[in-house]
Amino acid sequence: MAESISPLAGMPVTAAMLVNVPRLVTSYFARAPDPSIASQRVSFGTSGHRGSAFMLSFNEGHILAISQAVCLYRKKAEIDGPLFLGMDTHALSESAFVSTLEVLAANGVETIIDEHGGYTPTPVISHAILTNNRNRKTGLADGIVISPSHNPPDEGGFKYNATNGGPADIDVTGWIERTANEILVKNLIDVRRIPYERARKAPCVHPHDYISLYVNDLKNVVDMDAIRSANVRIGIDPLGGAAVHYWEPIIERYKIAASVVNDAVDPTFRFMTADWDGKIRMDCSSPYAMARLIAVRDKFDIAFANDTDADRHGIVCPSKELMNPNEYLAAAISYLCGNRPGWRHDSGIGKTVVSSGMIDRVVANLCGIGQVRRVMPAQNTNKQKTLILGDHQRPFGPTTQINSDEVRRDAILKKFEARDGVCHGCGHFSAQRRINAPLILSPTSEAA
């Protein structure tokens, strides 16, 4: 692996590495995919459809077809509540947002968009869905997040979130994928669409204050009082992503001693350092992409970053630089299960095959003191986990090495299978100051 590391890794990006945004957007609108070519068809992976307009894998035709397929799926599944729509800061996200809204409005879907035309992180869409759906059996909401996550600046992404708040399961995405490709084959003749200006003013499109509702509810998941009272110095880098306008309201609302080290939004992401392969990638788990935050770690007690749709987080410590994510997950499980009196003691910890065995040892210790009962069986993919959060049997469920699910402090389900980098960043600060020690476990420690 060391031989494959680019000499540009961790270095400031150069002008030659920046994407040509006007050319990229032109490619999105002007070029049409050929569905007879496999690489140009709609393809839903574990995190939705992704691609680049330059490669004819993320163009307007794809988004029109997928959006229409989502409308048809909602009708088939009898989902008649609002659809929460959000986007991140990638160059293609704004263009795809326009295409999506034109289709949703033409189909009469009650669509909720940011009141200021701003960016909306993935966990905020999940929060909005679950807030709407709590204690409901009808009028259930779902959502769309337009984001390729931490992928390079020339890429775009489209994710469909189901009524459980998280990424739709493979049976749903498979149906949407097949239907969208059928629409592409028929040259989009089945797409219902109205011009963007009409769509914005359509009776079914509603502005929404995503920021205030999410920020005000954060205290029900994270002990923000513990962070404020400890006066811990926090550094935050949104990496130019969708969370950029959320952190200042969080800092102001909870009076925490935090500062945003970079609030720039630039679709070229020229402020990044190159990832391991010399590409620009907003990967908060990469020490190369996180080089700027690591360089200023001594200015803070703790610092962290989110990727562009804020469903991931990376923690930087003065002593450890970029923290091992599995160590954080194990420590977070130990802390949360011991400091959430509202959680049931017969609960289990959800675990996937990509999560560390360290979690098993932590849970074995918790079982020994009666705080949880078991580790739930590992599953093969993030979308095939044990589906039992609804009865509070699983208070914490790591989904990848740097993401996890949590239940609120009052034991009401916060979110299902939707990863929240904002909550986990705050959660680390809270836990660290509650126990008055850094939340770092080594693989050889007894606690691990």
Image (cartoon, rainbow, N blue to C red):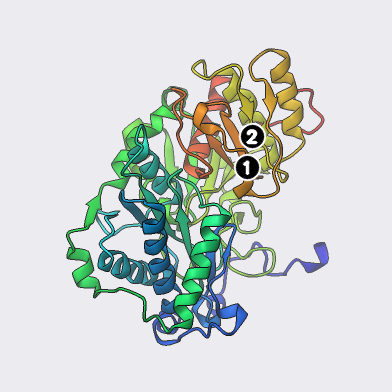
Indicate the position of residue 154 as horizontal and vertical percent values. 51, 73
Task: Please tell me which residue is depicted at 26% across the width and 55% down the height of the picture.
Answer: 110
Lower position in the chain sequence, tag 2 or tag 1? 2
Where does the N terminus fall, quadrant-wise? bottom right
Q: Which amino acid type is shown beneath numbered disc 2?
A: Gly
| Residue behind mark 2 | 350
For the residue pair 323 and 342, the one nearer the viewer reads as: 342
- Is 348 on the left-hand or right-hand side of 251? right
- Is 431 on the left-hand or right-hand side of 351? left
Q: Is residue 228 above or below residue 213?
A: above
Q: Nearer the viewer, mark 2 or mark 1?
A: 1
Taking the image as drawn, is residue 438 in sight? no
Task: Please tell me which residue is depicted at 69% across the width and 43% down the height of the picture.
Answer: 379
Indicate the position of residue 80 as horizontal and vertical percent values. 31, 51
Indicate the position of residue 168 as horizontal and vertical percent values. 51, 52
Q: Which amino acid type is shown beneath numbered disc 1?
A: Lys
Taking the image as drawn, is residue 335 in sight? yes
| Residue behind mark 1 | 385
Q: CA distance from mark 2 to mark 1?
A: 8 Å
